Image (tube, rainbow, N blue to C red):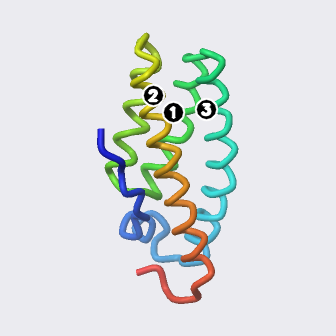
Amino acid sequence: MKQPKGDINFKNLLEIAGGDEEFIREMLILFCKNSVSLMKELDSSFQQGDYEQVSSLAHKLKSSIQIVADKDLHALIKKIELESKSTTEQKEMKKMIDLLGHSMTGLIKAIEKRLENPNKFN
């Protein structure tokens, strides 16, 4: 599986927010804050072999990622959610979680950089 870019989906954000850029800023700030802690929990749950919790945390991340990020990142988190329910292939799951972590780190950095820029989101 190739690494998703983790690009910000401004088109989707603008549509959901009705063009309200302050609302978009708030959504992005919350996304960054919540995603970091959820990713830590997801990784910890995987390390402990708690795949049910991995699935639950992936589900929580999935809806936020669907709003904020590109389709590739959403497809990855969806796959983690589904496969963690039934997989016994830990190496493949570890690869997917590592890919997710790298992509999320890049996405969060891009969001933080964008939030520093006072330009519009379109």
Disc nearer the start of the sequence (3/1): 3
Q: Which secondary structure lies at badge 2?
A: helix
Determine the CA span between mark 3 and mark 1. Answer: 11 Å
Residue 6: name its quadrant: bottom left
Q: Residue type at mark 1?
A: His
Q: Residue type at mark 3?
A: Leu
- Determine whether 72 is above or below 21 in the image: above
- Determine whether 118 is above or below 6 in the image: below
Q: Residue at x 53, y 45 (%)?
A: 101
CB within 8 Å, label 1 to label 2: yes
Residue 95: name its quadrant: top left
Where is mark 1, residue-wise?
59
Q: Position of residue 108 (x, y in %)?
A: 56, 61
- Determine whether 23 is above or below 55 in the image: below
Question: Between 63 and 4, which is closer to the camera in this rendering?
Answer: 4
CB within 8 Å, label 3 to label 2: no
